[in-house]
Amino acid sequence: MAKNKTTETAIHPMDFINAVKDETKRKDSFSLIELIKEQTGFEPKLWGPSIVGFGSYHYKYESGHEGDSPLVAFSPRASAITLYLSGHFEKRDEFLEKLGKHKTDKGCIYIKNLDSINIVILQKMIINHIKHIREMYPDKSETINIK
C-alpha cells in the first residue's frame, strides 16, 4: 500500500509562512493561524512541505487505506489560499453561499484573501467540519473544545 505523502513534519509552520512571498497571503496566513488556533485550541504544525494543520485524526477507508490527517488545515498557494475542509459537513452549501468570494473543488475551498470572505461564516464552517470529521472518525485520544 502506498505511503501517505502529507505527513506531519518537524518544520515550524511560522518559518514556512515567513517565507511566503506575497505579503497579503503571508498576513492572512498569520491571521488564519490565530483564528484556527483560538477556535480549536491546537497549535499549528506543518504537514508536508506547505500545509498548516491543526490537530489530527486517524482515518481508515473501506479499501483498507489508512493514515493520519490534520483536523483543520490551510495552505497559502500561489493562486489562492486553500482551506482544507470536508466536502460533506452540515450546512456546507448554505455557508458557502454566505462565505463571500471563493471557489471550491471537493474538500478544498479557495480564497484570494480574508478580506473577501465572511470570517464568522468561516468559523461556523470550521465547527461543522470538525463535528463531521469527529463523527466519521471518532478518536478519543485528542480532546477538542470548539469555541
Image: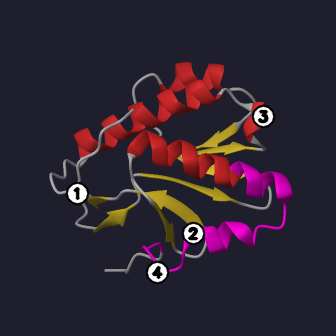
Which badge, 2 or 1, comes first in the chain's sequence? 2
Alpha carbon distance from label 1 to label 3: 40 Å
Which badge, 2 or 3, comes first in the chain's sequence? 2
Whether the residues at callouts 4 and 3 have beta carbons within 8 Å, the answer is: no
Q: Nearer the viewer, residue 49 or 103?
A: 49
Q: State the SS at label 1.
A: loop
Q: Amino acid at mark 3?
A: Asp
| x 27%, y 58%: residue | 59
Q: State the SS at label 3.
A: helix
Q: Amino acid at mark 4?
A: Ala
Is there any visible trace of residue 106 in the rendered image? no
Q: According to the image, label 1 marks what residue?
A: 62
Query: Quarter of the image containing the C terminus?
Result: top left
Which badge, 1 or 3, comes first in the chain's sequence? 1
Image location of residue 30, percent across then percent down? 66, 54
Q: According to the image, label 2 marks what residue?
A: 13
Write the start and end of the magenta stretch as one range.
6-28
Foreground: disc 4 or disc 1: 4
Alpha carbon distance from label 2 to label 1: 32 Å
Classify residue 51 by image quadrant. bottom right
Classify residue 96 by image quadrant. top right
Can residue 96 be found in the magenta stretch?
no
Whether the residues at callouts 1 and 3 have beta carbons within 8 Å, the answer is: no
Q: According to the image, label 3 marks what residue?
A: 115
What colouring method underlies this structural image?
secondary structure
Foreground: disc 2 or disc 1: 2
Q: Amino acid at mark 1?
A: Glu
| x 82%, y 51%: residue | 24
Alpha carbon distance from label 2 to label 3: 22 Å
